[in-house]
Each structure stands twice: as C-alpha cells, then as structure tokens.
Amino acid sequence: DADELWDWWVGKKLADGLHLVGSPKMDGFRCVLSHDKGKVSIWFEDTAQERSNTPMLSSLVSSLRSLPSFVLDGEFMVSQSSKLLARTEILSVLSGRLPADPYIALFDLMYWNGEDYSTKPYSERLSQLSAIRLPPLLHMVEHRPITDKPSFTAVSKWAAAQPGSEGL
C-alpha cells in the first residue's frame, strides 16, 4: 500500500535529502545482459543457465555485439503484435511453443565502455543509460521524480497503470 511505503521509506528518504524517482516494476524475468570482447551473455532469474544461445534471442545477441563492453540490468519480457504478454507465457516463448518477440525493459547500467557505474549514484547511471543508442529490442524504463507525498501517489498510480507493470 502506498501510504505504508510512504511512512516506512519514501517520506524518510526525502526528509534525509535524497532525490527519488519511481518507475514501473515490469512483470517479467530479471535479466542481466553483458558484453565483453565479442561475447554476449544473457542471464535470467529463473535459472543458472546462460541464455545467449536461445534461438529467439539470436537477433538481440547480434545487435548487442555492436555495442562497447557493458553490463545492463533489466526485465526480460515478450510481446506479440506490440502487446506485452504475461510473465507466465515467457517459458513457452523461450521453448518455441508460442511465437513472440523479446522485449527487454532496462532499468540500470552497471558498466559501460570500460567504466564501472555500479557505485555511482542512480541518477548518473540513468543519465548514461538514456544517452546510449539502444538496439530495437532494448527499451529504457521511464522514471519520474518523487518530490513529496502527492507526487509519490501520482507516480505510484502512473507506474501501476503502465502495460506490463505490476506496480511501482
């Protein structure tokens, strides 16, 4: 509940002077993508299996090889005719039983072109991520500022209403 989250965390962090943003919590598989010296790796939360050899990801892997070295954090989802499918459909798509396209919603940048961003402020990581020309299957998750309780309430409602979102 938004009021509980405000009282427990958000209000306190804003009172401490932190700058906060809110974004949709996308309903897919957590996904870490990396590229180093021509090797692309894709890891999902569902298994310890590296997924870059999955046939449906071949065009994504090819497009990622054109980027400099990176580590990106996001949510792996799937879409049909530009409509995001439910998380429960992902394994059917990965196994080839259901036709769909990969859709990766990025929300963080940990490493880019020789520079470690993992310890930098989130705002700096987002700024660098937004400056990158992403391949077509990668999409940056929109973030909105939270400055007070009314903006927190508005951002929470907006995030929950986004396609593929399970909330803030």
Image (cartoon, rainbow, N blue to C red):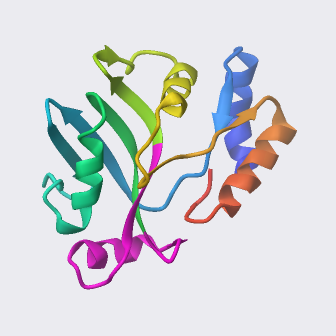
What residue occupies the far right of the structure in this picture? 150
Residue 87 found in image quarter: bottom left
Residue 44 appears in the rendering: no
List x then y, in percent, for residue 72.
36, 37
In front: 65, or 84? 65
Magenta run includes residue 63:
no
Residue pictured at 20% horizontal, 76% vertical: 95
Residue pictured at 55% horizontal, 65% vertical: 164
In front: 85, or 133? 133
Up the image or down, 98 lies above or below 28; here it is below
Magenta run includes residue 97:
yes
In front: 65, or 112? 65
Q: Is residue 53 left or right of residue 135?
A: left
Residue 69 found in image quarter: top left
In front: 115, or 89? 115
List x then y, in percent, for residue 143.
64, 40
Residue pictured at 65% horizontal, 61% vertical: 162
List x then y, in percent, for residue 160.
67, 59
Q: Is residue 154 left or right of residue 113?
A: right
Q: Which residues are magenta?
A: 79-106
Residue 54 appears in the rendering: yes
Residue pictured at 58% horizontal, 23% vertical: 123
What residue occupies the far bottom of the structure in this picture? 97
Residue 39 found in image quarter: top left
Q: Is residue 68 left or right of residue 49?
A: right
List x then y, in percent, for residue 142.
62, 44
| Numbered label tally | 0
Up the image or down, 98 lies above or below 63; here it is below
